[in-house]
Image (cartoon, rainbow, N blue to C red):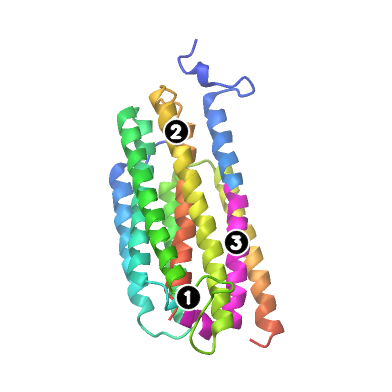
Amino acid sequence: MHPESRFLAHHFDSLEQQHEAATMGMWLFLATEILFFGGMFTAYGVYRSFYPQAFVAASHHLDVTIGTFNTGVLLTSSLTAALAVHAAQAGRRRAVIGFLVATMLLGATFLGVKGFEYHHKFVESLIPGHGFVFPGPHARHAELFFSLYFVMTAFHALHILIGLGVMAYVIVLTRRGQVTPEHHPSVELTGLYWHFVDIIWVFLFPLLYLIR
Amino acid sequence: MAHESISRTTYFTIFLILLALLVVTVRVADVDLGRFNFLAAMAIASVKAVLIAYYFMHLKTQTQLTRLFAGVGFAWLALLLVLTFADVATRLGG
C-alpha cells in the first residue's frame, strides 16, 4: 500500500489529481472573493470620480505613516506564509508551525494597528452617522468616503480574523501529523487565502491613504 | 505537492521588491503628476499583485487549468470595472 494513501479520497485516482482539484477549488472560491471586493472597489471608483476633491480632503485625515507600516507588516506576513508552505514541502513540521505563528502574530499586529486607527477616527468624529463632523464644504461627500473606508477595511479585517482562525486550526493539524511533504493542502490553501487578503490590501492602501 | 517548489531565495527577493515598490508608491504620491498619480498608484499595485500571485501563490508552477481558474476571476473583475466606468465616463460628460 502506498504510504500516503491514507490521505487519498476514494473519488480521486491519485494524490496529484486530488491536490490539483483542491487548488482549483480554492482559486474558484478566490474568484468569488475577487468579485465580492470588486463590487466595493467599483462603488469606490464611481463615487471618487463624482467627488474627487471631497475624497482628497477626507483622505488627508488618514495617517500615511501608519498605513505604510501596516502594509509592510502584511507584506512580511505573506513572506512568512510562503515560507510555511516551503517548510511543509520539505517536511519540516516545527518550521511550519513557527512560520504560521509568525504569520498570525503579524496579522494580529495589523489588526491592532487598525483598531488604533479606528479609535482615532472615533475621537475625531469621523464615524459616518449622527456624530460625523467634517470641516469645510465637502462634509457630506467626505462622509461617503469614510463609509467606503470603514466598510472596505472592516471586511478586509474580517478576512484577516478568519485567516487567524484557519491558521490556528492548521497548526493543530500539523501537530497531529496531518502535514507531510507529499500532502499538505491545509498549509498550501491557507497560504493562497492569506496572499489573496494581502493583495486586497495592496489596492486598498493607495486608494484610501494616498490620494493627493 | 507534485509540482516543483520555488526557492527561499526567490521568496526573499520578491519580498524585498514588494517593500521597494511600497516605498516607491508612497513617494510617488507626494509628487504632483495630475491624473497620472492615480494611474501610477494602480500600476504599482498591479505589479505587486502579479508578483504575489505568480510567486507567493505559486501560479508560476501550477497547471494551465489552475491558471485559467485564477485568470477568470480577474477577467470578470475587469468586465465589471471596464463596463461600469465606460458608462460613468460617457454618461455624465466626464
* Pick the front one: B52 or A200: A200
Question: Which residue: 35% across, 80% down?
Answer: B30
Circle 1: element type:
helix
Q: Does the magenta stretch include residue A52?
A: yes
Q: Is residue A123 magenta?
A: no
Label 2: few (<14), some or many (≥20) within 10 Å? many
Question: Which residue: 29% across, 53% down?
Answer: B13
In the rendered view of the protein, which quadrant contains the C terminus of chain A? Answer: bottom left
Q: Mark 2 points at which residue?
A: A170
**Region in magenta:** A30-58
User: Of tags 1 and 3, which is closer to the observer?
Assistant: 3
Circle 3: element type:
helix
**Residue B47 image offset from top left, x and y in percent:** 43, 62
**Are labels 1 and 3 on one chain?**
no
Give the amino acid type for the residue marked by disc 1 in the picture.
Answer: Leu
Q: Mark 1 lies on which chain?
A: B
| Residue A177 versus residue A52 in the image, above or below | above
**Residue A71 image offset from top left, x and y in percent:** 37, 60
Q: Name the residue under label 3.
A: A38
Q: Residue furthest right?
A: B91
**Residue A145 image offset from top left, x and y in percent:** 54, 74
**Residue B39 marker:** 1
